[in-house]
Amino acid sequence: GLGVLVNSIILHTTGKMGNRVKGRPKKKSIKAATHSGLSAQRKLSRFGKNRKKDHAGLDATFIGRAKVLKRLQISLKDFRRLCILKGVYPREPRGRAPRNKKGQVFYHIKDVKALAHEPLLEKFREFRAFMKKVRRSANRNEKDEARRKEPLAPKYTLYHLVRERYPRFTDALGDLDDALCLVCLFATLPSDGRIKAGITRKAQHLASAWGAYCATTSSITKSFISVKGVYFEAEIQNTPIRWVVPHNFTQYVPEGVDFRVMLTFFEFYETLLGFVLFKLYAGIGLRYPLPVAASKAANGSVDTNVTSATLHPTLGGKATSVLSANLSALQVALQQASKGNSAAEAVKYSLQDNEDFQAEVEKTASKASKKRQQQLAKSVDDALRGISQDDDEDENIDVGSDESMGDDEGEQVPIGAPLREALEAISDNNMSESSTNVDQDTLLADHIRQNPDAQKRNRLFHNLTFFLSREVPRGYLELIILSYGGKVVWEGQDSPISISDPSITHHIVDRPKLLPSYTSLPQNREFVQPQWIVDCVNFQFVLPVSKYGVGVVELPPHLSPWVEDKEEGYVPKYAAEVEKMKNGELIENAVAANENEITADSEGDDYSSDGGLPSNVVKKDQREDMVESRSESSEEEEEDEDDQHEKELQRKQLEDDEAKQLAKALMSKKAARLYGRMQHGIAQKQAKVDNLHKKRREIESTREKKDGKSMQKLKVERLKKERKDVEDMYVETGGSMKKKRRKN
């Protein structure tokens, strides 16, 4: 009642009603009328609503790290470990940063929700509570109570994370590069600080188990020695896997490396490699892990499956390396798992590690393969017979006949093709027959039989035995040689044979000269440097050992097998030479040169009846007279032909340039811009190729010859000699070519 009375008094005295002015129209209300038929949803869609903070847009999708830590209620150290194990990494939002916070670390809301439901998060919280109890006991000086609580610490496994991150086995193989690189790195690090001896030993066993599998199944395809280490590439189930093994030197650990992060990665990669190796070893009929970790069983009795040759000296064995221990354990496991026709026999036949392999193949060869070999041998005999007939015809043809010389040049007997085909077919038959001799139930034989590339790699070092001197790095060389079908022996108590065994074909030495004690060794072996093995593997061809001998300072270039020469547009000189050797071109040229020398010697023994001069000298004089008579008339014709050919080339080049300019003028702006970028890329690629050719010319020009002088020095000496001869001739006429100094 009092409010109404006050309003009436104000209205009576001022003539106003609230904010309204008398005589002006009433303002329209922004609120919907109570009698309006609009629902609450339609009102919200029409008039809108103030959006709450961090509930939509980039602010809600991407969250900063500090906010994530507050949301998950964990420390920064545990958050880093959880992200590494879970595979969660920061994301950068497209466009603008949330609230223009540039330079911050953001995580996606979906990743944060996945971390919130991770079982490891609860384990981390339990461990934090457990450490509070241990610290409380330690602060109270209750050491016995703290030691009693130590075995009660919460434990966790990472098996569910491996299955979650890699649902298929091919996914795990594709992500194995980083795991192998990190494991091989920890295998070479010293036990210092956070790196304990147990971690180094685990890394060595993982790397050696992986190397033993690759060597047994011949999975190594490429290798390269660099400053950082030795790069390898293996092909497993059609998936290429590349990793690097550091050199076996004393490693100095830098101070700026955070090993907590690296150890977290190693913790996950250890579990991942365990899964992968278990699957791979099960594929060849073995159970992983191999018995190389302990020489006694759990009850204290001696394990009969473990011998001293399969154990490292740190475990009481005689093996001189962890890789050799795993290889020996692999052979022992194959023998123990064998029943009837054992898996060890599958290794013996499929990997060609038995000296009686050829005899077994000959005994069980099929009729079809024999018939094919006979046909190939017949084709080689026909080619050889054609060569002998051509030689007989050449003796009856006159030397001065140009037509007969042209016919001889045009007709070439293709001996190289049938001979190569015969050798390859015979080796293929041997390998296929060897695989048929193996029991069909052996998993290792099936694995090797299904991979023809592995069979081809096994034939590279077949029947070759390599002895590694003590200065040679044994780890990666042993892995390469075994993967390509060779046998490895070394200086050590667990070596299969001694250094003086006559079955050794190649002695690997990395010294400037041979030791005097090597003179007493058998003379049927080749002394080569370690690079020869890697180059043979990369070229898939057994190279000549003359360029890799002991004491050779300038070795052939060590080319990377991952560079595609044809795509790059530049083929190194040594690669071209090896390709010619693989095709038999250099060998055929050498044979032809030897035949020419033999025919020249045989002709030199015949003497003509006129003047007592050899017949070849008389024929040579006759040919020189004929050439001199024809040279005068042919020089003019050749000059005219060269001029016409050069003019024709210039005309074609001019027409091509005009056509390109016309086509470019008819292009749209977008197409012309795209064409310009293409030409720019082609020009850059060609510039790199030209630079490589220029470097090759400079190297060849500065390379020293046998007399110790480079090409440039020889050229300077030749020019000086020519100038001196000209000066001497000018002096004889009474003049001088020397400049006189002007007198001031």
Image (cartoon, helix red, strand yellow):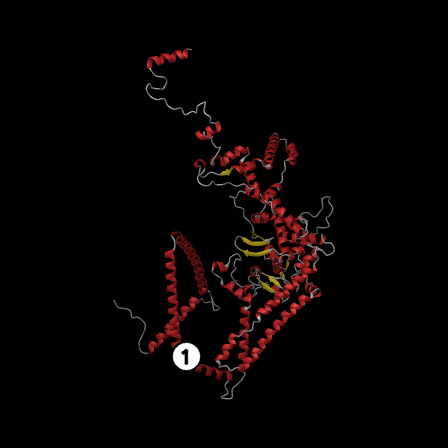
Is 78 located above or below residue 368 in the figure? above
Q: Nearer the viewer, residue 164 or 500?
A: 164
Say whether residue 643 is left or right of residue 400: left
Residue 227 in the image, given as x and y percentages of width and height = 52, 54
Say whether residue 224 is left or right of residue 44: right
| Residue under label 1 | 631
Q: Is residue 446 visible?
A: yes
Q: Indicate the quadrant containing the C terminus: top left, top right, bottom left or bottom right.
A: bottom left
Is 550 located above or below residue 729 in the figure? above
Secondary structure beneath label 1: helix
Q: Indicate the quadrant containing the N terminus: top left, top right, bottom left or bottom right.
A: top left
Say whether residue 391 is left or right of residue 357: left
| Residue that protrudes farthest toward the left in the picture | 744
Say whether residue 225 is left or right of residue 94: right
Q: Nearer the viewer, residue 459 or 149?
A: 459
Residue 323 in the image, given as x and y percentages of width and height = 63, 52
Amino acid beneath label 1 = Ser
